[in-house]
Image (spheres, rainbow, N blue to C red):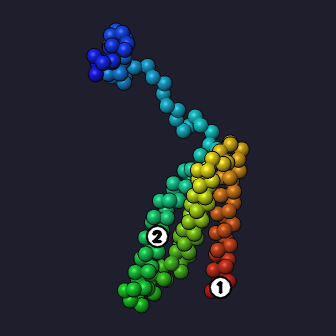
Amino acid sequence: MLMIVSRVWPERNVREAYRAMTQPTVTRQRPLSPHLSIYKPVITMTMSIVHRITGGALYFGTLLLAAWLISAAVSEECFNTVNALFSSWIGRLILFGYTWALLHHLAGGVRHLIWDTGAGLEKHTASRIAWTTVVFSVIATILVWVVAYSVR
């Protein structure tokens, strides 16, 4: 490989480039990567992080949903126990959070689908779409819970 490259470039340049690439990182003068403390948080960055967090929350929330369904298949006593847990104030808080995570992740996914078409990538438009996902997820979560309680 060195022989092939050396025919194209002078041998001295190839050897210098090879030494520079194999030199330990500590001795090289490289720019440092900016840390999060340098960046001012913007809504698009925050929504990207929240989208990842809601994805993880949906994973664990779906396990709770599966536990509820499995308890219904096991026995009536088991179902009543799990149902009582989900009917408590902490259970309802978890279910409310799961509903919000689901709707927020849905809105974030739609935002990414819009970006995949090439639309909405301008800084101002991306910020507006990010705020729209926040507003949608909050309003839709409240609306789902109001409808659920009115049907009950």
**Secondary structure beneath disc 1?**
helix
Q: Is residue 1 left or right of residue 90?
A: left
* Tag 1 near tag 2, CB within 8 Å: no
Seen in the picture, residue 127 relative to 55 is either above or below; the reply is: above
Seen in the picture, residue 114 relative to 151 is either above or below; the reply is: above
Residue at the image point whose x is 48% and y is 24% from the top: 31
- Label 1, label 2: how many angstroms apart (C-alpha)? 23 Å
Where residue 25 sits, quadrant-wise, is top left
Upstream in sequence: badge 1 or badge 2 = 2
**Is residue 16 visible from the viewing direction of this image?**
no
The three-letter amino acid code for the residue at tag 1 is: Val
Seen in the picture, residue 62 relative to 32 is either above or below; the reply is: below
Residue at the image point whose x is 64% and y is 74% from the top: 144
**Is residue 31 visible from the viewing direction of this image?**
yes
Crowd rating for badge 2 (residues with CA inside 10 Å; few <14, some 14–19, many 20+): few
Residue 63: x percent and y percent?
Answer: 43, 70
Q: Mark on residue 151?
A: 1
Q: Quadrant of the N terminus?
A: top left
Residue at the image point whose x is 28% and y is 16% from the top: 3
Q: Nearer the viewer, residue 15 or 85?
A: 15
- Residue occupied by mark 2: 62
Residue 8: x percent and y percent?
Answer: 37, 14
The three-letter amino acid code for the residue at tag 2 is: Thr
Q: Nearer the viewer, residue 110 or 54?
A: 110
Q: Mark on residue 55?
A: none
Where residue 95 sits, quadrant-wise, is bottom right
Residue at the image point whose x is 56% and y is 37% from the top: 37
Q: Is residue 4 left or right of residue 94?
A: left
Q: Quadrant of the C terminus?
A: bottom right
Residue 72: x percent and y percent?
Answer: 43, 85
